Image (cartoon, rainbow, N blue to C red):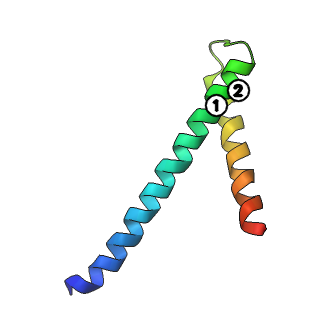
Amino acid sequence: MSAQKKPAQSIELSENILKADVAERIRQRAYEIYETRGREDGRELEHWLEAEAEIRDERVRSVAA
């Protein structure tokens, strides 16, 4: 029975790593947006959502290619 759980655990671990990588890329891009727009405070959510959309679109394009 434990042999059946290992592949599922491996898949879950891989998914968690992928999610962490995507979150880090979004964080980095949001910071880049913040910097290029003059470091204006109070727009964190706007920057995050814009970065998230860019990263999501980038991932969709790479899968479609």
Measured along the vertical axis of the image, is residue 47 above or below residue 62? above
Q: In x, y percent, where is residue 46?
A: 69, 28
Kindly check if marks 1 and 2 are in contact, taking CB atoms under 8 A apart as contact.
Answer: yes
How many badges with numbers are in the image? 2
Quadrant (top left/top right/bottom left/bottom right) for the C terminus: bottom right
Q: In x, y percent, where is residue 50?
A: 72, 36
**Based on the displayed image, in which of its 4 quarters is residue 9 positioned?**
bottom left
Q: In x, y percent, where is residue 19?
A: 50, 53
Residue occupying the point 65% across, 34% down:
29
Viewer-nearest residue: 6 or 48? 6
How far apart in space, not on screen, are marks 1 and 2 (Cα)?
5 Å
Tell me the kind of residue under disc 2: Ile
Q: Residues within 10 Å of mark 2 (few under 14, many from 20)?
A: some
Residue occupying the point 67% across, 21% down:
34
Residue 6's disc number: none
Residue occupying the point 66% across, 20% down:
43
Tell me the kind of residue under disc 1: Ala
Visible residue check, residue 45: no
Give the SS element for disc 1. helix
Measured along the vertical axis of the image, is residue 14 above or below residue 56? below
Q: Is residue 23 left or right of residue 1?
A: right
Residue position for label 2: 33
Residue 30's disc number: 1
**Based on the displayed image, in which of its 4 quarters is residue 49 positioned?**
top right
